[in-house]
Structures are given as structure tokens and as C-alpha cells.
Image (tube, rainbow, N blue to C red):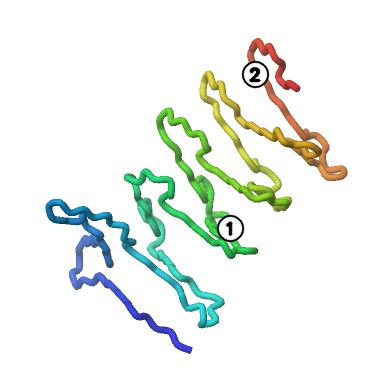
Amino acid sequence: AGSHNDLNITRTNTTSAAVITYIPSGSLAKIVNANSTVGAGSTITDNATVLDVQQNDTAGGRTTGTTFAITDLTGAGTGNLAASITANSLTNTTGALTVTTNALTSGNALSITAGGATALTSGAVLLVTGPTGAAAISGGLVQATATGNYTGTGGLLNLLATTSTAGTLANFTNNTASFTGNGLSISTTGATTGNSLSITTGGTTGLTSGAGLLVTGPTGAAAISGGLVQA
């Protein structure tokens, strides 16, 4: 057995001054793929990868370990980031970050754990912020797609809160004035014996004062021509 580093870079900031305010910046390691320079009449297409990390030891019997690890022990702060990806000039359909795990069976392609036991209060484990203007988003800000004929009961989106006794499992809010869209749209034009919406609640005798489905209408004198609930 052996453990070693083929490349080890360490920076330690020290000073003997009694009173000093020292704010180091810069990068411990910086890799730059600069603009290409070619002669007159020449062309160049730079398709190089700036950083390529590969774990190819298939003969070593590897069962654990991490190909790429980032550890941040700096503690609390308003501007601390463990990792940052900025690609403001990206216009293609490939994306800024892709994860491919074609051999995955029971694991997770992406696993996010945050908040400890009770630490997470006003933050979010995953925050997706869309355009600030009137953008015509045809595919959805967040998409979950599957072209295969899957038969599992988990579905494309599975929300679980097995120990929660209060709160909201899923929340859809759009209180914009004069909203003419749909808060929730379900289309299953090919359904035969299934259900477009199935609600099971209360167990055997659990539901007492609540409701399996609650629809609350306007509190003022609204002229509802088609009915609050339509079929």
C-alpha cells in the first residue's frame, strides 16, 4: 500500500508583524489558454481542452477513491465559493456543465447534501435563476426528459418527505397581476387506462379535518364565467 502526491502545491501566508491587515489574492495555480496569434492568410481553430483529468487505471481493481476532489475548509463567509463556473459567452447547446454516467445502475449521477440536521433555513440546496426579461422559454427553465419506455413507479420527478409532519412538499407561486398562463399544466393525450392526476391521502383513517383536494377561489366579487372548477 502506498499514498503519495505526484504534484503538490502548498501556499502558506505568514508574517512576523504584530499588527497587520493582509489580504492575499490571486490563484495558487492558474492555467490560461490565451488568444491565438497566426500569420497573414492562416487560420486556426482551437478545440483544445484547458484541463483534462482522467482516471484510466482499469486494471488496478479500483473500488473507491475520487477522480476530482474539491475541499473547502475556510468556514463561513458571504463570498466564499468552493467552485465557480462562468461561461457568459457560451451560446451552443452543449451547456456549461455536462455529467455523463452511462454505466450507472443504483447510484446517483449528481448528489447534493447540504444543511446538516437543522442548519438550512432561508437558503436553498439548489437554486436556478432564469432570465430577468421577457424570454420565450419553450423547453422549461428546468427539464427532466426520458426518451426510453421506462416502467418504474418513481417517475421522472420524485419528491419524498418521509418524516415531515408539516410544511409544503411542492410549492408553485405566480402572483403576478393579469397572469393569463397556467400555474400547472398536465397533458397526457395518449392515456388509455392510466390517470392524468392521481391523489391518495389519509391512509385508512388518517384524514379527518383536511382535504384530499382544496380549491380556494377569489375573496372579492369576481365574475367567474366558467366556474372555479371545470370539467
- For badge 2, the amino acid type reads Pro
Q: For the point 72% across and 16% down, which residue is it?
A: 227
Query: Residue 161, percent across and down?
Result: 67, 50
Separation (CA) of disc 2 from disc 1: 39 Å
What is the quadrant of the C terminus in the image? top right
Q: Is residue 124 left or right of residue 189?
A: left
Residue 113 seen anywhere in this rendered image of the structure: no
Q: Residue furthest bottom?
A: 1
In front: 178, or 46? 46
Identify whether 207 is placed above or below 56.
Answer: above
Q: For the point 75% across and 36% down, which residue is it?
A: 191
Q: For the point 43% across and 84% down, which residue is it?
A: 3
Q: Residue furthest front?
A: 41
Find disc 2 in the rendering and name its residue.
218
Q: Residue furthest right?
A: 204
Tell me the mark number nearer the camera, choosing from 2 and 1.
2
N-terminal of the two: label 2 or label 1? 1
Find disc 1 in the rendering and name its residue.
117
Query: Residue 5, percent across and down?
Result: 37, 80
Query: Residue 42, percent across and down?
Result: 17, 54
